[in-house]
Image (cartoon, coloured by chain):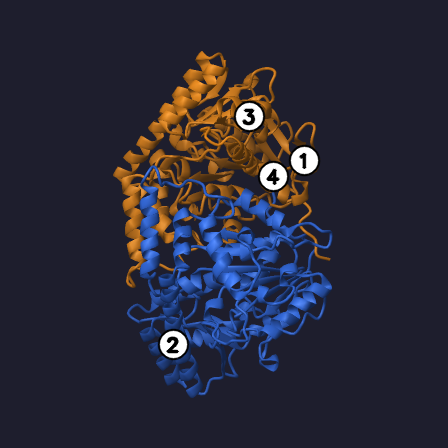
Chain colours: A orange, B blue
Amino acid sequence: MLKVNQNYLKLPGSYLFSDIAKKVKKYREEHQGQEVISLGIGDVTRPLTPTIIKALHDAVDDMSDIERFHGYGPDLGYAFLREKIAEFDFKRRGCDISAEEIFVSDGAKSDSGNIQEIFSDKCTIAVSDPVYPVYVDSNVMAGRTGTYDAPSSRWSDVVYMPCTKDNDFVPDLPSKTPDIIYICSPNNPTGKALTKAQLQSFVDYALKNRAVILFDAAYEAYIIEDDVPHSIYECEGAKDCAIEMRSFSKNAGFTGVRLGYTVVPKNLVDTEGKSLYSLWARRHGTKFNGASYIQQRAGEAVYTEAGQNEIAGLVSYYMENAGTIRDGLTSAGFTVYGGVNAPYIWVKTPETMTSWQFFDYLLNNAQVVGTPGSGFGPSGEGYFRLTAFGSHKNTRNAVERIVSLA
Amino acid sequence: MLKVNQNYLKLPGSYLFSDIAKKVKKYREEHQGQEVISLGIGDVTRPLTPTIIKALHDAVDDMSDIERFHGYGPDLGYAFLREKIAEFDFKRRGCDISAEEIFVSDGAKSDSGNIQEIFSDKCTIAVSDPVYPVYVDSNVMAGRTGTYDAPSSRWSDVVYMPCTKDNDFVPDLPSKTPDIIYICSPNNPTGKALTKAQLQSFVDYALKNRAVILFDAAYEAYIIEDDVPHSIYECEGAKDCAIEMRSFSKNAGFTGVRLGYTVVPKNLVDTEGKSLYSLWARRHGTKFNGASYIQQRAGEAVYTEAGQNEIAGLVSYYMENAGTIRDGLTSAGFTVYGGVNAPYIWVKTPETMTSWQFFDYLLNNAQVVGTPGSGFGPSGEGYFRLTAFGSHKNTRNAVERIVSLA
C-alpha cells in the first residue's frame, strides 16, 4: 500500500525559516511602503569579492572550451580544492587531515541533513539546545527521535544539552549516553564558541562512550579568541570520534553559490568496526553527483592570498555589525550574549514576552525581523537571535529602531 | 551503541561507475602511451553553448554587485526558472503542470536518489530491468529491498520488470503489485523509448493499483519519434499517480554544472490522502538549500530561442554518434538496440562472453571503455552499453577499433 514516510508526519509545523519568510511576506503585503529590515535568517548581503568573481568567470570560460570543459567531476570533489582545504583549514592548524578525507558538497546544510543517514535508526542523538533545526528535523525524518511533546517542545528520544545563562551557554555533557552528539561551535544561534578545553571534554566523553561527534564549524572564520579551536581536530583524539562539517557560505559569502565540505577521517569506525568513511563515500557516490566544477574553482580561489584577505574583510565587516548590535541593545537595557566569536547575537526577550511574541512585537513596532529563539529548541524560549549579516546602514537603523522602543 | 546503517552493508560492491573508473585508471597506469577511448559513463563532452556561457557570466557579474547579489534562494527554486520550465517543458506539450509544482535541484541524480525517502520503508518498489543503478541502490540504503542473492543478482523484495529482446525491451506490467514503479524513458541503459500507448498502460495500471510512478525523463531531448511522449503528463491521469524527474545534463551539457528538477503534482496523495508534494517540499526545505543562483540563470537561458537552438545542435551532434555506433557495429555483425530516441546503444555481447568479460575484452584489445550491462540489473547480463556522448572523431575511432576485432 502506498504510504508516505510516517516520520515526516511527526514534524510539527514547517521549517522555521520558511515560517518566518511567510510571516514577513504577509506583513510586507499588508504594510506597503514600510521598510522592513531583516536581521533574521543567517544570509549574507555583501557581494562576492574580486578574486572569487574572477575564479568564477575563469571557470565559466573553461566550460566554453572543448579542451577545458569539465563534465562529471570526481564523486568526492576535485583534488585541486580538496588539497587546498586540507592544507589551509587543517594542516596549518596542526590537524592531521588529508585531502582524501575531505568530501566536497553543495553546502553544509545538505551535509548536516544527510549525514545522519549513514547511522542506524536505532542510534540515539544528543543536541545542544538551542541548536540549528536541521539536526533534529533530519533525525525526526529518519525516525530516531520518538514522539513529540508539544507543551515542552521536546522529542522523547532526543538527549538535550541545555545551553542557558546558568551554564554560560556551554552545554554540559549529556545526561544520558547518546551515540551521536551534534555540536555547533561557534554556535548557531547563541553565538557562543567553545574553548579548546571545553571541546576537548566532549571529545574525551565521546571516546570513552564510543559515540561520534558531528561537529558543525560553519562559523569558524568568525573566531577571534585564541583559546577557541577552529577545528575539532585540534583536540586530541578527535580523529577517532568526530566528523566535521564546513561551509563557504559565511566566510566567503557563498550562500547563493552553494559549496561546503565534510571531513570524515578514514579510521573512524562504529562499535563493530564498520568504516563511516566508506558509508559516506557510498552515499556521495549514489545520491549526489559532485559539486559543480565552477563552484569548486571558486572555492579554490578562497585559499589564495588575495582570497584570504578578501574574506577576512567580509568577516570584519559583519563583525562590526555584531558590535553595533551588542552595544546598542546593551545600552538600551537588553541582556545580550554572543557576537564575539560569531555573527550571531542572542538577546534575552523582555520578561513578559515569549520568543514569538517578541518576534511579532519587533516586526510590528520596529519593522525589524529576527529569529525566535524557541525555533531552535526548548531552551531557546525567551531568547531571540539577531544576525550581523546586514549592511552597516541597515544594522544601525534596525538597532536604532529597537532602542527607540525601549 | 554507535552502529552504521545496516542496510548500506547489504550493497554488493561499490557504485558501478566508480568500479569502472578504477579499472580504467589501473589500465591507463599500466599501459601508458595507449589512448583509451571512453564510451562508458554517460557524460557529455561538448562545451557549453554561447547562450549558456553568457548567462553564467552575467549571473556571476550579478553576484559581484551589491544591488544584484543573491544569497539563499527560494527553497524550491527561483520563479524565473520554474515558470520557464512549466511553460516550455509542460504547457507547450499540453501538460497541465504549474510552476509551483516544479522543484529545482542540483541534479536528477540527487533527486532520483532522494525521492524514495518520502515514502514508507514498507513500500515495495518495481524497476524495469536493466535500469539506472541509483533507483535500486537508494532503496537498498533505505531497507526496502530485502536480501541480495548474488548468483541471480536479485533483491528478494524488488519487483523486476525484465526488458529483453523478447519483449523488445518494453517492460511488461509488474508481476506482483508494487507501491512505487520506477520507469526511465528514453531508457538508460537500453536506449528504448516507450510509446504513448505503452506508457499510458503503466499510468492506467498505477491508477488502478494506487501505485506511484517515478518517471525519469532525463533523456527526453533525444526523442525524435512522434508517438513517444516527452513527459509522462502527456498520458491521461498521470497527474494523479506520477512524479517526473528531469535533468539539464544531457540536453544542455550541464553534467559539470549541476542542475535538474522534479515535478510533484500538488494533488498527488498516498492511500491515506497524505500529500507527496508537502513531504518533498519539507525535504527540500530541511536537507537542501536550493540550487545556485548562477546555475538557475543558466537554466533559464536554456529556454531562450537561442538556447533552444543550441541545445538542439548538441543533441544532433551526439545523435550522429549514435548512428555511427549503430551502423558500424551492425556491419561488423553485432546485434544492437537503442540509439534512435536515446544517446545509448545497447549491444548484445558475443555469445561466449558475459558483460564484464566483454568489458575487459574491449578495454584490453580495443582500448574502448563501455559499461557492462549486468551493472544495470540481472536482465542486463549479456549486454553492453555504449554512449553517444564522445566526439565524432573518438566515436569513429572507437567503432573502427571494435569493428577491426570482429
Q: Which residue is mark 4?
A: A14
| Disc on the earlier residue, 3 or 4 | 4
Residue A113 picture location, percent across and down: 54, 43
Q: Which residue is mark 3?
A: A359
Q: Residues within 10 Å of mark 3 (few under 14, many from 20)?
A: many
Q: Which residue is mark 1?
A: A157
Three-letter amino acid code at the position of disc 2? Glu
Q: CA distance from mark 3 to mark 2?
A: 61 Å
| A335 is higher (above) or lower (below) than A148 | above
Chain for disc number 1: A
Instruction: Indicate the quadrant containing the C terminus of chain B: top left, top right, bottom left or bottom right.
Output: bottom left
| Disc on the earlier residue, 4 or 1 | 4
Q: Which residue is mark 2?
A: B320
Chain for disc number 2: B
> What's the residue at 51%, 47% (across, down)?
B76
Residue B265 picture location, percent across and down: 60, 55
Q: CA distance from mark 4 to mark 2?
A: 49 Å
Element type where label 1 sits in the image = loop
Element type where label 2 sits in the image = helix
| Disc on the earlier residue, 1 or 3 | 1
| B296 is higher (above) or lower (below) than B404 | above
Q: CA distance from mark 2 to mark 1?
A: 59 Å
Chain for disc number 3: A
The lab-note entry on whether marks 3 and 2 share a chain reads: no
